[in-house]
Image (spheres, grey):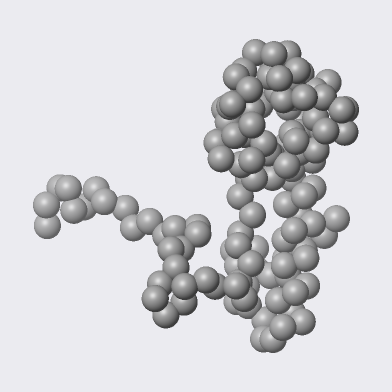
Amino acid sequence: MTIRATNQAHVIPLRPLPTAADPAPRDRPREPLWRDLVGEVLRRERRAQGRTLKDVSDAARISMAYLSELERGRKEASSEVLAAAAQALGLTLADVLALAGERLVSLTAARTRDRSRSGPAAPAGPMGGVLLAA
């Protein structure tokens, strides 16, 4: 075995590509990604304040295009960028992360409820089947 072969990791994609046999797995909801949740929080807070992308991006000193991509979950922001966006919205980084965490818990709980109604239970994960609910 070569050094290159031993250094290659086995990567399991979070969002598997569709196959010919299963082109659109509609019966399986996709796993929520952190960048999507954080983007939802930023957009929701900005809109609740009646502010524009330009206003918030200027206050945060990040480009309007980048802020838009963050809100749409297209980019994974650094903690510095998230802190700047949060501050521009009058929030702390902790506020943004807590709101995103609450959303993740509610989505996970909803997915667990849907799965339990639709058939046999899924195998327990690393938490041993512990359910967190908001």
Spot occupied by residue 3 in the image (x, y as percentages of width and height) = 15, 47
Spot occupied by residue 15 in the image (x, y as percentages of width and height) = 50, 59
* Residue at (17, 48) in percent of width and height: 4
Residue 95 makes an appearance in the image: no
- Farthest residue in the left direction? 2
Spot occupied by residue 108 in the image (x, y as percentages of width and height) = 72, 61
The answer to which quarter of the image holds residue 133 is bottom right
Q: Quadrant of the N terminus?
A: bottom left
* Residue at (11, 52) in percent of width and height: 2
The answer to which quarter of the image holds residue 95 is top right
- Vertical arrangement, residue 4 with respect to residue 55, above or below: below
* Residue at (72, 25) in percent of width and height: 53
- Farthest residue in the bottom direction? 119
In the image, is 16 to the left or to the right of 103? left
The answer to which quarter of the image holds residue 40 is top right
In the image, is 106 to the left or to the right of 79? right
- Vertical arrangement, residue 101 with respect to residue 56, above or below: below
In the image, is 49 to the left or to the right of 80? right
* Residue at (77, 24) in percent of width and height: 52
Residue 69 makes an appearance in the image: yes
- Vertical arrangement, residue 93 with respect to residue 27, above or below: above
Spot occupied by residue 107 in the image (x, y as percentages of width and height) = 75, 58
* Count of picture labels: 0
In the image, is 15 to the left or to the right of 62? left
Q: Quadrant of the C terminus?
A: bottom right
Given residues 134 and 1, the one toward you in this image is: 134
- Vertical arrangement, residue 27 with respect to residue 64, above or below: below
